[in-house]
Image (spheres, helix red, strand yellow):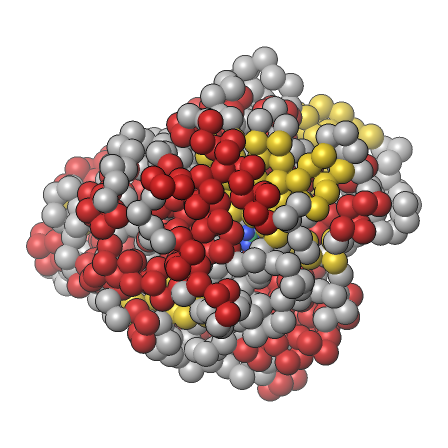
Amino acid sequence: MDKARHPPQSGTTEAGRKSDVYPYASGGWGSLKAVTKILVKEKAVVRDAAILPHQNKPDGFMCVSCSWAKPAHPHAFEFCESGAKATAWDTTAKRADRAFFKQHTVSELLEWHDHDLEDAGRLTEPMRYDAARDRYVPVSWDEAFEAIGARLRELDPASVVFYTSGRASLETSYMLQLFARMYGTNNLPDSSNMCHESTSVGLTQAIGVGVGTIGLDDFGQTDLMFFFGQNVGTNSPRMLHQLQDARKRGVPIITFNPLREPGLVAFANPQSPRDMLIPGDTQISTQYHQVRPGGDSAALAGLCKAVIAAHDEALANGTSDVLDVAFISEHTVGFEDFAAYVRATPWDEIERESGLARESIEAAARAYMQANAVIAHYGMGLTQHRLGVQNVRMLCNLLFLRGNEGKPGAGPSPVRGHSNVQGQRTVGITENPELAPLDQLARQFGFEPPREKGFNTIEAFEAMIEGKVRAVINLGGNLVRSVPDRLCTEPAWRSLPLTVNIATKLNRSHLAHGENAYVLPCLSRIEIDRSGGREQVVSMEDSTARFHGSRGVAEPASPHLRSEPAILAGLARATLGERSTVDWSAWSEDYSRVRTEMAKTWPEMFHDIETRMWTPGGFVRPLPARGRKWKTKSGKAEFCVPESLGEDPDMRESEPDALRLMTLRADGQFNTTLYNHDDRFRGVRGSRMVLLMNRDDMAARGIDSGDHVTLRTVAHDGVLREVAGLAAMPYDVPRGCLAGYYPECNPLLPLWHYAKESKVPGAKSIPVRVVEIDKTGRHGG
Ligand SMILES: Nc1nc2c(c(=O)[nH]1)N[C@H]1C(S)=C(S)[C@@H](COP(=O)(O)OP(=O)(O)OC[C@H]3O[C@@H](n4cnc5c(=O)[nH]c(N)nc54)[C@H](O)[C@@H]3O)O[C@H]1N2
Ligand SMILES: Nc1nc2c(c(=O)[nH]1)N[C@H]1C(S)=C(S)[C@@H](COP(=O)(O)OP(=O)(O)OC[C@H]3O[C@@H](n4cnc5c(=O)[nH]c(N)nc54)[C@H](O)[C@@H]3O)O[C@H]1N2
Ligand SMILES: [Mo]
């Protein structure tokens, strides 16, 4: 095997030797270079030069990368480095076809690096695992559907899990949830269970709607923006357009992030030659607070304390109100309890738990008090913690103090991940029967849906380990890589009697297969979908709750591919047979029929979707909180008293040498899809087996730059969790914390280390300890 093509999973790193951080602003020339490089590598240049201009345009296709909003008046090239990479990855000329699978056994492929598996190219035809030959072998679509349907009919529906990664369209997702429920289960976990579920729970409690309430129009009207734990330059780069426009108006941006992210410091727009040529890039963050991982509730308590103290002082002095008293009294409940709590919380506790000085927090509070309309953007830095839901509630508390919800230029802005992850939940992908319109579905389709709660992602794996799950149907995703505790969860996955993966590219979850395993290759959204002999279109929801139509523009990677709706229709027909009142074939030949049903289920949301989905900028779903209507338990916006400011019961003083590990993304990846081994912004090149460490923490342990360390999870459940071969790299992170990459560090994350209420894994606060230092692995030391 060619070494260069298959680098070891735990390689050495140039970064281990160099402590230089990417010296340029996010965007900029480096970004252009990276785009060109991947287009060439994927041999996609000619085709993509024609395809990219259609990305995120009202009559084009919606990017398969992140879910950031699509403006009504897009830039000539409304795509970014990440989006261009994702497009090149899907439209590659490479193929993992029958010749490929004839050549390589599954055991051999299991040794391949994740990057190389997907880099083999697009899957071209349906396959099943043949144990005798240890290979995936071609199978006809009908044979696959029949065999899977027969197996599913034998199984107890409660033992079957239907997982969705966040890319599938609204139409596909609607079909999947209906299929699962007609089959008899609410086991409908999805990627948001590992992502923004803390938002869905927290915002619903606080404002009565589980999604963000700002739109692109708000950027023009805001006076200040916060950024809590979201890495815009890498993970939602198109948003830099709006940030830059706001910065040009003088809007301050205040960032809370343990790591000094080059992508949050300065910005140069690679699509604006003027910005590229002006020396000195535009500053993004006007204040940068390096909060301790998991210290956000404390930082937010400090901000609220400073604001309430300023109000108390104003009252005493007879000067004007600092709080929005009218908003608080008319629209909220719980203010008095919350105010009493923050007044009573001493600054030294806030400083200790947040890792920030009182003066820094007060500086941020002063800026906040000067602004009339404030947006709070946030990401995984808030949601992926034991107290992830509370973090979201605390952010709302801060916004409520000055009426920053339901007015122009203000509100919470959870920046979502996958391109349609928000939309999937909107159309019924949920394990929670209370969130699904079960009565309506029962009436509409004449069946009795299951009423028991299903599994979310964590619960699905807990049940799998206990042997209670017998089959998983995966619509995208790569669960053996993306879920916690790989050393426990992968063996459980491999013992499944049936795994079915609907996917575009080969990944490890297909290879670590169950007894009966199928890989069903689907069209990418970028491709022209001619199901039923006509060009089909689909729809999705972006991070600002706007729905858009999407039309494929590229020729399919193989004539044997089927669309996701067509594959689900085939599976549903074969599994449900006469039991189903739905004409699945008709649906898969005309997706407008699916949209018609969606509009029957949610008339307020989807009426006239057939025309409205082509509205430039999308059409917005009803967001009562935007009009200050609160669909909460109390009928008001709800303040919340935090249960604790100390993040983690597993990370208390009793473990003196424990460190807090955050697992992050690089710009060379989209989740488990690894485009390359670089993290350009952070100055890491050639390997992802890297650990970003505070210099003093390194010195205290005798670790030099480039040494290979072994991390072990601090846990007392008798399970040994270790990752070795991580090259230490000094980085600007607070003492006591570390950063490594997801998914490489997932074996360290215990399955039970998740947010209370939302069960989002605590991927940003894994308690670990350095147990071994290998100086021989260092090059050039
Ligand atoms: N290029 C690219 N784009 C992507 C993805 C990708 O993998 N690659 N993934 C997509 C998906 S599914 C998602 S969910 C989003 C994720 O996008 P983000 O929400 O940006 O997620 P992460 O990169 O995991 O890390 C977020 C940031 O949180 C900071 N952080 C860590 N812990 C804390 C903390 O305790 N407090 C605070 N305040 N900050 C903290 C980290 O330093 C980092 O800058 O991106 C989407 N877009
Ligand atoms: N430690 C740690 N763990 C994490 C995180 C973290 O920050 N730290 N982040 C979490 C988050 S936010 C998320 S969202 C999850 C993501 O976890 P998953 O949903 O499991 O993973 P993805 O990497 O998004 O899925 C990639 C695969 O999807 C398939 N695919 C790509 N495009 C399509 C398509 O159009 N259709 C279909 N059917 N398949 C397609 C390809 O086969 C590809 O290999 O991981 C979570 N895990
Ligand atoms: Mo995500």
Q: Nearer the viewer, residue 595 or 401?
A: 595
Q: Residue furthest front?
A: 578
> Quadrant of the image for the N terminus?
top right
Residue depicted at 50% across the width and 18% down the height: 466
> Residue 122, position in %: x, y?
69, 57
Q: Is residue 119 visible?
A: no
> Residue 531, position in %: x, y?
50, 64
Q: Residue furthest top?
A: 718
Residue depicted at 84% across the width and 45% down the height: 103
> Residue 629, position in %: x, y?
14, 57
Q: Nearer the viewer, residue 367 or 215?
A: 215
Residue 34 to residue 640: above or below = below
Residue depicted at 20% across the width and 62% down the height: 604
Residue 736 shown left or right of residue 185 in the figure:
right
> Residue 696, position in %: x, y?
67, 38
Residue 529 to residue 422: above or below = below
Q: Is residue 572 visible?
A: yes
